[in-house]
Image: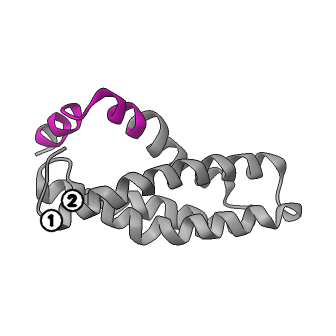
Amino acid sequence: MIKDIWASFRGLPVWVQIWIGIVLVPVNLAPLAFLDQPNGGLIAALSITGMALNIPIMLAARGMSKAMALPHLLLWSPLVVIVALTLADAEVATSGYLTFLTVLLVVDLISLGFDVNDARLWMKGRETK
């Protein structure tokens, strides 16, 4: 099964593999480094849970599935609102945290843009990569 998931991942376009492996996953794991910052625990919980809920989907599909967009839409939509509100109250956070939140916001907004389309295609029964 793991071999099937890996093969499915490697079957994605190279730019998608890079996006997921070098940008999306690391940026959404990084909130663990900021748990002591304003909303740090909530941001980490939403960020990581949005990815973790894809594990059962990958296992059931034996690979990548457009259904993986659904946990992102469910959890990262409120996440980007919380991040934006935290950025708006900049005086309570460190500059490093604010820089990270900006990166997280941009990355997850881009991801949500892809996710809206993937969820739409999944609901129409189109599972192609």
Are the residues flagged by discs 2 and 1 in contact, CB closer than 8 Å?
Answer: yes
Q: Reply yes or no: does residue 16 show up in magenta.
A: yes
Q: Reply yes or no: does residue 8 show up in magenta.
A: yes
Q: Amino acid at mark 2?
A: Leu
Magenta residues span 4-20
Q: Which secondary structure, mark 1?
A: loop
- Does residue 8 lie above or below 107 as drawn? above
Q: How many marks?
A: 2
Q: Residue under circle 2?
A: 121
- Identify the residue at image location x=55%, y=67%: 79
Nearer to us in this view, 86 or 111: 111
Determine whether, in the image, residue 17 is placed left or right of residue 31: left
Nearer to us in this view, 45 or 14: 14
User: Residue 44's x, y, as percent?
Assistant: 56, 61
C-alpha distance separating marks 2 and 1? 5 Å
Coloration of the structure image: one colour
Q: Which secondary structure, mark 2?
A: helix
- Taking the view exactly as shown, the residue that stands out farthest to the top is 14
Q: Amino acid at mark 1?
A: Lys
Q: Main secondary structure of the magenta part?
A: helix
Determine whether, in the image, residue 48 is placed left or right of residue 126: right
- Identify the residue at image location x=37%, y=52%: 114
Q: Residue under circle 1?
A: 124
- Taking the view exactly as shown, the residue that stands out farthest to the right is 91
- Identify the residue at image location x=11%, y=40%: 4
User: Residue 9's x, y, as percent?
Assistant: 23, 38
